[in-house]
Structures are given as C-alpha cells and as structure tokens.
Image (tube, rainbow, N blue to C red):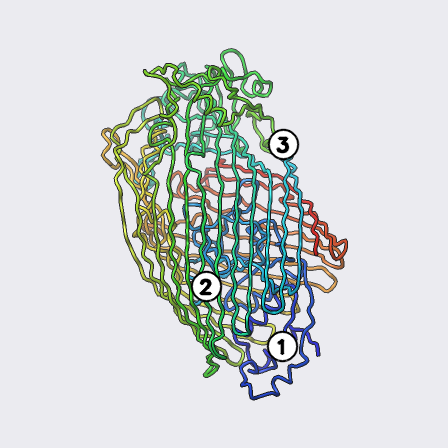
Amino acid sequence: MRAPLHSLLQARFARRPVSAAATLAALSCLAVGQVQAQVQPPAAAASAPPTQPAAKDATADQTLERVEITGTRASLQRSLNLKRNAAGVQDSISATELGRFPDDNVADSLSHITGVSISRTAGGEGQKVSVRGLGPEYTLTTFNNRILATDGAGRDFAFDVLPSDIINGADVVKSAQASVMEGAIGGLINLRSASPFDQPGQHGIMRVEGDRNFMSRLNGGKVSATYSNTFGKELGVLLGVVYADRKVRTDTAGNDGGWTRNPISDPAANWTGNAWGGNIDPNGNGVLDPNEEGLIGPGQFRVGSIMEQKKRTALSGKVEWRPSDDVKVTVDGIKTRLNSPQVGYQQSFYTLFAPGRWSNMQVQNGVVTSFTMNSANPDNQLNPELLNVTEHRVVDSAVYGANVEWKATSTLKFDGDIYQSTSKRHSGGQDTYTVLRMNQPNVTTVQLTGSAVPDIETTFNDGRDLVSGLASGKFGPSDFNTHYLGLSGDNIDDKIRGLTLNGAWTVDRFNVDTIRFGISNTRRDKNRDLVDNAINGGENYYSGTNAINVATLGGNVLDQHLSLPNFMNGVSGNFPRSFLGFDVPNYLAALQAYNGKPRPDGGVYDFSKAGPVWNPLQSYRVREKTTSAFIQADLSGDKWNADVGVRLVKTKTSSKAWDAKIQSLTENGPFNYTAVYAAPTEIGQDASYTYGLPSANFVWHFDDKLQLRLGAAKTMARPSVEQLAPTSTTASVAWGDFTQVYGGNAELKPYSAKQYDASLEWYYARNSALTFAVFQKNIKNQITTSWQTGVDIGVPGHLFNVMKPINGDTARVRGMEIGFQHLWDNGFGVRAQHTRNNSKSVVAGVEGPLAGIAPATSSIGVLYEKGPWSLSTTADHTDEFVSAINVLGPGFHERAKAITWLTAQASYEVNQWLKISIEGRNLTDAKQEYTLGNGQITLPQGYNRWGRAITIGASLKF
C-alpha cells in the first residue's frame, strides 16, 4: 500500500514523540530529491525483537514510490522539514536540484535565513556571515561537520572561495547541544554535500551560464557538471566539477586617511586628538583655543574603482560503500582554487592639516567644511596622487576525509570520522600600495558637501584645471614623480586535522531514548609570514628628494586613461571622473631599468634595496590542540522530547612570533619617516584552558502542528588565530603615526557565553509555518582593544600610542526572530523573516555598542512554480549598524547605512532534459555607504557601488 510519508510520520507521532534518531532517519529520506523507503509501524516496532514476524508483515506493503522533487518549492519544503525536526533551533537552505544551489554564492543564500546577515566583497558578492547579531569571529563554519581552514588571519570563513555548485545544503545551528562541535556563540554553519544515494541510479547535470553587469559592462561565465550513480544498494559515487570566470568592478570612495580631530582639554571627554600635522588652527595663533577643541577636518580622501577577475575551479567527490545493513563507509572531499586578483585604480587627495597649509577656512557645527591650499611651500601644497592598490589573492582550499558508521548491535552504534582541511594563500610581496604624486604648483579649494566625495577645484600655475584637464588628456608622465612604493602581502598556511569517535546507545527506558557519547581531537597549525618593504624602508626609497620624474623612467608607465562607464553615477560633486592609471608590473620594470643612475642622496639607484623582504614583526606560528569529550541523553515522553548533556573541552596553544626594536628614525619629509630596526628576536608563548559546556534543550508538542522549544547552554568562541601570537609592529611610523600595535598573545581567553533560546513554531499547513523565537547571550571575556597614549617604548625623542587586544568585561546580545512560509497549491508561495537584536558591550565600565552588528535584518520572497515555470524574487534588508566604535573619541562611531539587496530568477523547463533560466542580482542598484558621527555631526566615510547584473543559464540533465 502507498501512503504519504508526512501522514505516516504524523500517525507515529500521535502515539508517541519520535526519537531523535528515528526522526532524523525519516527526514533524511524526505530531504533528498527522491524517496524510496520502507516505513515502520507505529510505536517502537523498529526495535522489536526478530521473533515478532507480525511487525514485518504489517509493513510489507508500505513501500513508498520514488518521487523526484526539484525546484524552489521542494528546496523550501526540505528546509522547513529540517527545521521542524531539528533537535534545537535551526534554519536550513537546500539545493533546488542536483548541483544547483538557490544562489550563486552560499553566503547570499544564507542571507535569506532568519538572524543571518552578510558582508560583501568586490563585485557585491557575499563573503562573510554573521549570525544573530554577532560577527563572523563568533561563527564556526564546517563542511560535513569538519572545520574549514581559512585563508585569512583568523577563523572566519570567506564564502567566496567556495562555489555553491558543490553544496547540497547548509544548516545554521543557533542553539547548542553537547553532541555538536564547540566554537560558536553566534551560530554554527554546517555545509553539506550530496550523497549518491539521495537519488539512486544514474543522474547527471551540466550547466552553462553567462553574466553581464550593467554598470561596468563586464561579462563572465561558468560551466559546472555533477554526476552520480549507484551500483545496487552497496556502492555509490558522486563527482562534481566547476569552472567560473567572472569580471567585476566596484566603484569606491572614502576618507582613507582618517578625519583629523583636535584634542579636548576636558578629561571627561577622553579624547587627546589624532592630528599628525598639528592641531587645526583657523585663527592661526598657534594655540588651541576653547572654540577649536574637538574641531574636525579631512585628512585624506580618495575615489576610484577596483577591478577584479574571479576565476574559480572546484572538484568534489564522494564514494559511499554499504557492504551490509550495519556498515556504511564514506570517503569524500573537495578541492577548490580561487584566483581573484584585485587592481584598484584610484585618485588620492592628501589634504591633512599642517601649520600654514590651510587658509580661508569655513567652520560649521564643529567641522571645517571649506578651505584653500595655496601655500608657497611645495610641501604644503596639494599634490594630487594616483594610486595602484592591488591584492594578489590565490586561495587553494581542500577538505577530505573518511567516515565509518557501524551498527555494532541492535542498540549500539558507532560513528568514526577522520579528516584534513587546508587553505593556502601565498601573497607575500605581491600586494601593492603604490603612489605617483603630481609635482606641479597649484591652488586648491576643498569643500565638503555631504556627498561621498568633496568638491575639489585645483588650478595649476600654468592654467590647467585638474578636473577638465584629466578629462581632455592635458596631463601626462612629466606631471608626476615617484612617491610611495608599498610592496607587501602575507603567506598563510592553515592546516586542520581532526579525529572523532561517537557512539549512540539505545536505552528506550525511563523516558531515555538514547545515550550519546564521543571524543574528538583536533590540531590546527596556522602560519603567517609577512613579506613587505616597510621594515627595510623600501617603501620610501623613491620618495622625497629621491623621487624620479615619471617621464624620465620611460617604459610606458602611465599607460591608461580611465573613463569608466557609469563611473560614480549618482554621486554628486565636482571631482575628477576621468583619470590616469598605471599597472604595477610596468612600473616595477621601469624602476629596475633605472638601476645605476645617480641618486640625489649619494650612490646610485638599486631596486633591490626597495624590494620586499620577510618581515618578522607580523609573522607568527600558532599551533592549537583541542581534545573534547561529551555525553548527552536524548529523552522523550508523552508530547515532549529533550536532550541534556555536557561537553568538556581542553585546548593547548603554543605560539611563536618575533620582535625588533627601533634603533633610529629618519624624517624624510612631512609625515614621511624611515625606521631602522634591530635584529629580530624570537618570542614564544604557551597557554591552555579547559571549559565545561553544559546544555539542555526541551521541545513540547502541543499537537502535531504546534511546538515550543526551550534551550539553555554555555558556549564559547575562540580568539582569532592571529590574536594568539605575540606579534607587534610599529610600521605606521612610515607615515608619521607613532603607534605600536600588539597583535595578541597566547593567553587571551576565549569568549564564553550563557545563552538562552525559546522558539514557538506553528506548522499550520503542509509546507507552511509561522515561527517566533527569542534569544539572549551574556558574553564574558569579550576581546577588545586597549589604547594608551604617550608611552615611552625606547625610541629617543618620540612617545608612542600603544594598542593591545585584551579580554574586556562583558557583552550582551538579545533579540527576537519571526519567520513565515506559506506555499499554496496553485504554485504561489511567500516566505519572510525579520530579526531584531539589541546589543551592548561594557569595557572598563564604559557601555557602548558591539561593532558590526545590525540591529535588524529582514527578508521577503515571493515565488511561483507550476508546470515548467519557476519564478521568484527576494529582497534582503539590513538596517543601519555601527561598524566601528569610538573612531574619533567616545560616541563617535562609524556606521554602515541600511541596504536592501534584491534578486529575482525565472526558469523554464523546455523538456525533461533541458532548462533555461535568467537571474538578476542587485536589481535596485544598492550601494553600501558609511558615515562617521556622534548624533550631532555626520561625515561621509565610505562608498561602494557594484551595479546590477544578470545571469543567463541553461542546464542539461541526463
């Protein structure tokens, strides 16, 4: 006989709540595209002894037909079922079909989930994920329950390294269980790969895509293929391959050099100023008058565009062997490469105040809004600059492992897993921050208008105007000198090896269904080597009196006249919208060809003295060994089920770094210094900590549609890896900022939190639900930054600011989530979510916001799917939030403005083999803007625009 699986589960549930193991087993069948299962009878027939043949007879004809379910509706159905039957508070995203995730980027898909917000990288692509108002550093990302290595300095995972085509699902686990891996306070994100037994038999899909960005007029494409096959009930294989090549552009502007703010004499203001060139002095009397205290003026602003070519390749594979009903062996892995070089062509205007540099100052509401730069001193004139800022990002990632499931007896099961996860990015010395500086006398007027870029009017002594002259090609190599040559980048190797053995003992007595237990061991080795030319003074080798006129270099250095389509459209103001550009390889070749020419300070030019070298000051080796063990009881009774347990975690950390003292400082010009360092000395640190993490979860089933979840736990999130190394640097002295920055130390404690969850879930109709959740997290040992001024670090004639990471006092996050999904039988559907949170941190008794936390996120999606047509649109909204605190003193925060990201897709299934589709991203042309203010003053701080884009694709099944 045939019966809907949903009805059979309800029939069983009506008698007694299903045990966790049975529920998950049944749902794993439903969560795949095809289902072929034999349903057990009500009560506890699954554990009945073999001497009861009646139990077997009762199920002889209850075999479900295999039904292939694909598309957006099926994806939402599977995700809702996973949420409904999860042990704790969880939300999920599932693939729409084999090898096809709902969005091109996994982070974008996660942004539809309640409580999730994302940050975007070049081209507007989702990169980092925050959960329940806590940043990426509070989140742990795994793949098939294996920790993913990262190419950054910390633990937060960059989702742009991973093509979505190799993902079959993603779970955001928000509450804690003893049986779930520790390391997350915000939430654990587990990415899942498909199983060949999800769809028994032979299946394959190939997809071809092409995309177009309307702002940049750049194109891209992708080819992906997935193949799976099963050989009887014993063996299954699945293979996937992806190749993508996409060009993107990001228009950007910002106050890169920071705003200058005068000191405030009142100690209660707790602001000593940050001026490098002297306090802003409108009346020119050389004294900080009372009405000049706290006065603000611009330091450096820039405008330009970042070009990026994202090339992704990925291979994935899985082999499952089931030699008997009691044993399953799985070997799987993925290997990816992201080749994503960024080149930023930018104009920079270094307007920092210095005595005699500004005149005709206009002040409004404590801000210098207009001034003229007309000094006869060339050093005090404006020298417009051209920047080439590149990032060499080639990331090789891999994770592979083996898993064995063994049913030792009818009541005892074991699960063993061993894996290795790696990430490698070698960018040492290949990132650039190179500057060419105009050398022509001029008069410049700067006026703040509130726009992302100020008005700038520069007239040179020969009558040329900067804005119109750049547009008409009146400027060339002879107008520029060499200036700053920053060559840097780090080599990062991250390797994680893990071994886990878990067991489950079926008790089924005294309301105890199962006793779960396990032990795991993880070792992480993360090495960073910084390679730059800051430590050897090479960045200033061609600046100041040793600058070279670009025209004399030859080599076609200034080889680009950039008039980009739609550049900074929508940004008001008078500033250059056409500008010159140069490529670093040509520039470096020209500098090397200049070797042997006389150098004004004596000797001859030698490029090797400007080249990058290993910089020990921000290099480190960190090894982290963790052993954890847990025990958990799964309980159930009439209308309820629960789990209670504890996880014990012991971590040992050993780290190594280097230190080097400044022996002398040489001033090359205003805000331009060269430091001479002593030989580096090695520093080593060892530390350890042990945490007990208890947890409890309870679910009350009012009926088969309404359930209440309650949860309480102690959780932890480890410090970012680079914060465990005792590094320090004084590199900022190169541009006149005397600050020593400590990167961390091994004795920093993890964040810990007591968290509480409650969720009321009403599954009022098939594939439809209304859910409401509240949560609170009380965080201890919050890692923040201490700031000390006027510290003598042993450099004659100079006092330094000192920054250090410390375990602060406390933080608190509380909030609520509302989720809604309804799918009508006529093909229409709607889903919506809203999350609101309230957070604060308390450091040294001072209360303030937690940076990087959006107070509210929302998402609403509408879909229609019937017959061959599938249509959907989704809007994801993130409210304005504080992105950095106390930038210009207490209460003077940087804020990211609210943003709404709109996507839409339409597909048509021509026949059972061919489907065509069109997708749109950022259809409202959203921009990310930043401001800086304290409630009375608001200043522009940053701007990013990515433009609208569409993707046209076709997929072929076989």
x 50%, y 40%: residue: 930
Q: Which residue is mark 3?
A: 566
Q: In what element is the residue under mark 1? A: loop
The C terminus is located in which quarter? bottom right
SS label for mark 2: strand
Q: Nearer the observer, disc 2 or disc 3?
A: 2
Which amino acid, by three-letter code, is at mark 3? Asn
Q: Earlier in the sequence, mark 2 or mark 3?
A: 2
Which of discs 1 and 2 lies nearer the camera? The answer is 2
Using the image, determine if residue 751 lies above or below residue 28: above
- Residue matched to label 1: 39
Question: Label 1 amino acid?
Answer: Val
Check disc 3 and report its element: helix, strand or loop.
Answer: loop
Q: Which residue is more in the foreground, 705 or 216?
A: 216
Vertical placement of residue 734 versus 846, above or below: above
Query: Comparing marks 1 and 3, which lies closer to the viewer?
Result: 1
Residue 47 coordinates in the image, percent (x, y): 53, 82
For marks 1 and 2, the one nearer the N-term is 1
Quarter location, residue 271: top left
In the picture, measured across the screen, residue 658 lies left or right of residue 949, that is: left
- Position in image of residue 120 (x %, y %): 53, 44
Q: CA distance from mark 1 to mark 2?
A: 29 Å
* Residue that appears at 67% across and 54% down: 205
**Is mark 1 in CB contact (under 8 Å) with mark 3?**
no
